[in-house]
Amino acid sequence: MTDYEKTELVNAFYQLRSGADMITDMANFHMDYFNMDNIDANQMDIHFNLPNEQDKEIFLVWHRMLMFETEQAMQAINPKLSIPYWDSSADRLETSPLWEEDFMGSFEDNWSLNRNFGHDGLLPSPQSITNMLQMSDFFEFSNFFERQLPHSGAHRWVSGAMVTSASPRDPVFYLHHTFVDKLWHDWEETHDASFYLRTDMLRYDGTYVFDGETLPLVNPNSIVDSRALGVFYAENGLATLDNYIVSNTHLPEELFYYRFTIQAGDNFIAAENTTSHLQSISEVILTPGFLAESGSNFRASIDAETTSLLARNNQQQYPREKKPFDDVELEQVWLWSEGEMDAKDPAVVMQTFPNPFDNKITITLNKKKDCVVEIYNLTGALIKQEFFEFTDIIEINDLYGLAAGTYVVKVVDANGETLVAKKVVKM
C-alpha cells in the first residue's frame, strides 16, 4: 500500500467509529449472533453450522457481505479506498509493517484491543492454504476453512479482541476477512461449486436498520461470485477485471482504484447510462473483450496526485483519539481447532468446548466413529475414561468433582490412534 492509502484507511476506521459508530454496531451484531447452539438451537447464527446444519450455513457469504458493507461505508468517505487483504500465511511477523503505529498499530492502545501476538495459536502455513484450496466439496471446504488455521489462525495469533466473539472491534479483522474472502474467490474460480441452502441471512434480510438506513435483502447464492459485488482482487502486481457489467447499483460512479496495473477485458462492460472509472498508480490496459457501450460515461486514468511529494507532505490525519470500547463480558472463542489439520483426514476432532469448563465438556467430531475419551491431570494420571460408540457428538458430564486447574483431554479411536490431545481448564 502507498502511504496515502495507509493514512486514508486508518482515517476511515477512526471515522467509522464517530457518529453512529459502525464498527461497534458490527462487533455487537457479530457477538450477538456468533453461535446460538447453546442458547437457542432454532435461532440463525453466523458460525459453526457445518457439518450438521447445512440449512443454517452462511459463514463465508455473511462475512463477504460484512466486508462489502464496510468497504462501501469507507468509499463514502474516500472513493479511492478498498480494504486490503492480510495474507497471514506470508506476513507472519509481529515486527511486520502491518503492526506499525502508522497502520494497524494505531488502534492497539486507542481502542484497548489487548493484542498478544502468538499467545493463543499459530498462523497458517502456505502449504495449509494450498491443501485447503484443493478440496472439492463446498461444505467440506467451508467447514475446514472456518475451523482451521486459514481462518482461525489469525484470530488466535492476534489474540485480544480478535479471539472473542466481538472480533470486528479490531480493524485487522477486516484485513483478515478480506483475505478469507479472496481465498474463497480463488477456490470458486477453480471449482465453481459454492452453493447455499438458505435464501436469506442475518443482518442482510431486508429488515435490519443501521443509522436510519435499511440494509438490503441479499440471497447468499446471488453473491457466491465476488464479481457480483464489483469486487476484484489484485495479486502479483496485477488487477484483472473481467466478466462484470457496470451497473451503478451501489455508487453513482464505480471507481476501480489500484496501485497495481489494471487489465480490463474478457467481458468487462461499461454499460449504457452508467459511470465508471479505472484508475491506477502505474498502468491501465484494455484488452479484447472490454466494451464501453455507447451512452456510457467511462474513463481510465493514472493517479499522479496522491503519489506526488506535495500530496505526501499535505496528507491529513483524522484525529487518532482514544476511544476504548465499552466493557462487556466477552467470551473467548475456543471452538476453533488448534494446529494444522490434514484435509484428507476425516477423523480429526473439530471442537472441544467450553474451555474453561465447569460441569461438562462437549467434543464434536466431523465423522461418526467408536472412540475413547481420556482425561489426565498434569502429572499424567488418568482420572476419567469413557467409551463412545459410533457418534460424532461426545459429552463428558459430572465433572463438578474435579479440582480447578489444567487437564489434558485425549481422544483415541478404536485402532488406538490418538486423534487429539488438548489442554482444557477447569473453573
Image (spheres, rainbow, N blue to C red):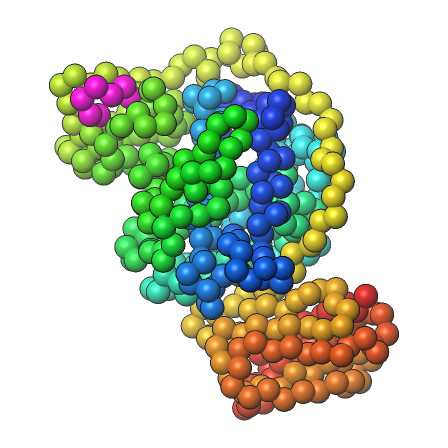
Q: Is residue 391 above or below residue 361?
A: below
Residue in the image at 74% along x and 43% along y: 328
Q: Position of residue 12 (x, y in %)?
A: 56, 25
Total numbered circles: 0
Q: Is residue 126 above or below residue 410?
A: above
The answer to whether residue 117 of the structure is visible from this angle is: no
Q: For residue 273: magenta?
A: yes
Query: Quarter-wise, where is residue 36 in the image?
Result: bottom right
Residue in the image at 46% along x and 21% along y: 76
Query: Quarter-wise, where is residue 97 in the image?
Result: top right
Residue that protrudes farthest toward the bottom in the picture: 415
> Left of 186 or right of it: where is 242?
left
Q: Nearer the viewer, residue 371 or 328?
A: 328
Residue in the image at 64% along x and 77% along y: 395
> Left of 409 or right of it: where is 57?
left
Q: Position of residue 110 (x, y in %)?
A: 72, 30
Range of magenta residues:
270-276
Residue in the image at 47% along x and 68% along y: 52
Q: Position of residue 248 (x, y in %)?
A: 30, 25
Q: Position of residue 190 (x, y in %)?
A: 29, 55
Residue that protrudes farthest toward the right in the picture: 403
The answer to whether residue 17 of the structure is visible from this angle is: yes
Q: Quadrant of the C terminus?
A: bottom right
Q: For residue 165: magenta?
A: no
Q: Nearer the viewer, residue 138 or 354?
A: 354
